[in-house]
Image (tube, coloured by chain):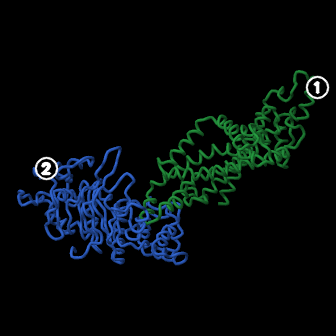
Chain colours: A green, B blue
Amino acid sequence: MFRYLLKRMLTSLLTLAIILTVVFILVRQMPIEGYFDNFDKLDDAVIQASLNRMGLRDPILVQLKDFFVRLFHGDLGTSARYSVGVPITSIIARKAPLSLQMGLISMAVSLILGLPLGAAMARSRSGFWDKFGTAFIVFVTAVPAAVYYIYIQSFGSSILGVSMLFSQNDWRTWILPILSMAMGNTAYYAMWLRRYMVDEMSKDYVRLATAKGVKSQEITMRHVFRNSFVPMIQYIPTSLLYTVSGSIYIESLYSIPGMGGLLVDVITRQDNPMVQALVMIYSCIGIVGMILGDLLMVVMDPRISLSRKESGR
Amino acid sequence: MPQTEPVLSVRNLQVSFRLRGEVLHAIRDVSLDLYEGETLAIVGESGSGKSVLTKTFMGLLDSNGWIDGGEILYQGQDLARFRTEKEWLKIRGRQIAMVLQDPMTSLNPLKSIGSQIEEAVRLHQGLRGRPAHDRAVECLADVGIQEPERRYRQYPHEFSGGMRQRVVIAIALACNPRILICDEPTTALDVTIQAQILRLIRSLVKKYHLTTVYITHDLGVVANVADRVAVMYAGDIVEIGTCREIFFDPRHPYTWALLCSLPQLGIKGEALYSIHGTPPSLFGEIHGDAFAPRNDHALRADFKERPPMFTISPTHSARTWLLDPRAPEIRKPEILERLKGEGLTHV
């Protein structure tokens, strides 16, 4: 177990280093015009001075070395263009908590709605809940999110009688964005849980449990639901962590001051330190999420063991 | 045996399934008595309805199947009239327990062996906590599993096929049933393991005075375990009798054909006997004797009218017109004379 984790950590660090190097080199291939709002009107000396200040004149390998050295000292640097001179950590510390909060709540909502819906669909195969759930899933997958987000915003705010825009201190304005965010995942969880449960229900161990006199409700809960949830649990840490990144569309729709769209924003404005920092954070989230997911699987499924190679699934 | 009262009595049972919009008659008018303490084997080829018949005893028919008519009498109740889960919960496990065919899939892979046995102990023996645990460990020891305390905590994937079948048997016993149904309990196992499992079931049946129904298509198994044998064909019992009667004095042409195809009767260098043709489709009505089209000895009456059950002895009856006084005398195939004990009593 410990050896496995150590190995995973090392390969993760390697992965991270490769990602950062590639991104670092890529952003430096951008035309230098992008670093200035009014490139045409500036004279050459100002431009050169600016580039020097941003450290873009050094040979790329030297820049890369400096970047990693600073990173090892825990210094993500300061924003170069987004809000000049402000430490990146403080920008993120300002924006991330709100996205994280909303993301976590919406995740909880989608689990609370999606899992019972999926279970009800599996139990009432081709009954009411199954038809209702299928309609919901088809709707959410087929209709572009942008369309129903707008409907939720305009109708929802008039029904609830709240402002269309988000305000952090009014809890009622949290409802609609969270609901919008939860829609996709609710459908997703319901669909997969139904699928896995239907699979499990036709298995022999369910028949044996019935034959030994277990109530069908208890079989659904104690045997089928649990076994069906295991393949889904692997992805939950990842999606949990990714809520930090926020939702571009929903955050702009309700003008929520979160992380959503931050990465796109800093890429278009060629704020290299910000791009690098955000890429690093998101990569870490992905990597840590996957490790956590695998560990959760080990906890939930006795057939999976980390210490022995041959006992994979 | 008929002098004692039957534990379970099936009267004119009919079961149908709806498959792709058509109705399939899986059980066509079956009557059967099960006596206290006996071991009854039900033999027949795949699709003859032997599994379906026993499933009706526990309300385990798939959702597209239903009982069309007849009764299943058990302790003064008609199981055929049970509709709700609540009624069945009084029967399942507690009165009738089942061992399924494939031990590799009949245990929940994510639950420990012990907890799966304990589930049955809690449900049917009213024990909780420590006593339930101890009882489950006892059950494991009972089915011949070494180090039961350690095995209790293990998971199904840590057990071999034969061991898992022992666990499945332990679960059935943990329910403390009166009747044990073994649905091809050895089909999915290695030949060497088969013999062990059969021996185990036989000793446990004796120890707990269980009434047992064995479903199998292996006549070797039948000779090994059964007191009585029922031969099923196309959803009907065509012949029923004691083990001796079925093997040494079979009367129905289908029983003859089944016995003829025993590999023990083959002559070296010659092809084994096999029954030509295919079983009839169970969609729609079957006229006469269902086996007639494949029967070399079929009489004209066999195609016209379903033969009644003719009684040969108090324990032996068969559903064939050959037993009618008007029928010409047709003797069983000569080859069956060679069935004199040899090669039958071992698996």
Across and down, in percent, residue A195 comes to: 52, 48
Question: Is A149 displayed left or right of A203 in the figure?
Answer: right
> If the image is split into quadrants, where does the C terminus of chain A sit?
bottom right
Q: What element carries label 1?
A: helix
Residue B41: image location, x then y, percent: 27, 65
Mark 2, residue position: B304
Q: Which amino acid does label 2 sit on?
A: Lys
Residue shown at the point (87%, 32%) measured from the top left: A57
Please name which of the two marks, 1 or 2, marks the residue nearer to the observer: 2
Viewer-proximal residue, A302 or B94?
B94
* Quarter holding residue A227: bottom right
Report the chain holding disc 2. B
Nearest the viewer among A310 and B43 is B43
Q: Is residue B237 left or right of residue A42?
A: left
Picture residue at 35% right of the left edge, 53% below the top: B65
- Residue B156 position in % (x across, y down): 49, 63
Instruction: Rate crowding at label 2 as few (under 14), some (14 to 19) or many (20 or more) other CA atoms within 10 Å.
Output: few
Q: Where is residue B162 in the image (x, y as percent from the top left)?
A: 41, 65
